[in-house]
Structure formats: structure tokens, C-alpha cells
Amino acid sequence: MPDDGLAPTGGVTTEDRLSGGTRTLLDKSYPADFRWVRRAVQNAVDELRSDEVAADALGSVEIVLAEALNNVAEHAYPEETQGELRLIVRRRGKALMFEIRDKGRPMPQGRAPMGNHPMTEFDQQDDMPEGGYGWFLIREIVSDLVYDRRDDENFLLIRMSATG
């Protein structure tokens, strides 16, 4: 039976119902630098853990955010430029939503890469092939992924399950 928002529900406040049940757990900006990416990921995981998100979902969150934020740190800004990224973490019931914003370069062809499937076999004497595996992994884990660019700002929106 659908929830009409009128019946009392355990742990859900009036504010949650008025906002459609979406709660912002984290909204913070960080330097777009590998040292700060780790802190951003840890802050998000800590907030989600305190919001009682399932442990296996936290592992997936850690992978997705590390890959996405490292891409911003590595590719969005020229090496000599100190950029910034913003991470917003929201929860609505069993769904987790992440918004990553930066004012770096747009993604190639104006969309998030599909990613490359990792090779299952390769010659041990050859170097491991590089590139695109992170995007493949992200897309395998998340429910939805949307990229947009407006007013010189990149927006990456990610939705995934809080239950693993």
C-alpha cells in the first residue's frame, strides 16, 4: 500500500516527509587533489555508517566515490591549476544519491565514459592495459548515473542502493 505521508512512520520526521523523505547527510567542498579525495570518501562513508547504511553498501559506495572523485582530481583541472570539488550525499529511504560538482574541463563528448571491460586474460610479460576500468566498475555498481554541464560546472549524479 503506498504511503500517503499521513500515517506516522518510525524514524521519519515531518521535515523528511515534507522534503519527500530526502535527507542531505553531507554537503562539503574539497580541493580536487588525491590527498583530499580520500578524506572526502571517508567523510561520506562515516556519515552513511552513522545513518545505518548496510556494510556491503558502504564498500560499494567507497569504490564508486573513490573512482569518480579520483577522476575529477586527475582529469578535470590542468596540473598547474588548484581546483575544487563538491560532494553532496543524500539519502531517501533505501536509495543513496551522490552529487559531485566541479568547475574543471567538461567530460569528453559531453558525457560520462562507458568504461572498458577489464581484460580477463593478458600476457604476464606485457604491461597491464590502462584506462576506463573505473568507469566500467562505477556503471556496474550504480543504479543510475547522469552527467551534465551547466554554466561551466560539471554535475555527476549517482544513485545506488543503501542495502547493498
Image (cartoon, rainbow, N blue to C red):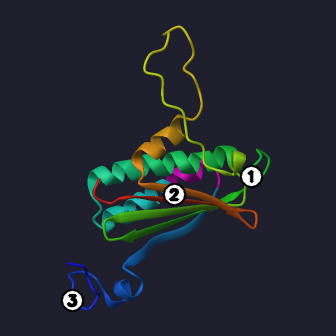
Q: Position of residue 139 (x, y in %)?
A: 47, 45
Residue that extends furthest to the right in the rendered view of this protein:
80
Q: Position of residue 77 (x, y in %)?
A: 73, 50
Residue that extends furthest to the front in the rendered view of this protein:
1
Asked whether, in this view, residue 110 is left or right of residue 130, the answer is: right
Going 54% across and 20% down the picture, which residue do you hit? 128
Callout 3 secondary element: loop
The residue identified by callout 1 is 105
Going 35% across and 48% down the picture, which residue do you hit? 59
Vertical position of residue 97 compared to residue 2: above or below: above
Mark in front: 2 vs 1: 1
The residue identified by callout 3 is 8
Q: Which label's residue is closer to the chain start, 2 or 1?
A: 2
Residue 92 lies in what quarter of the image? bottom left
Q: Position of residue 125 (x, y in %)?
A: 53, 7
Q: Which label's residue is closer to the chain start, 3 or 2?
A: 3
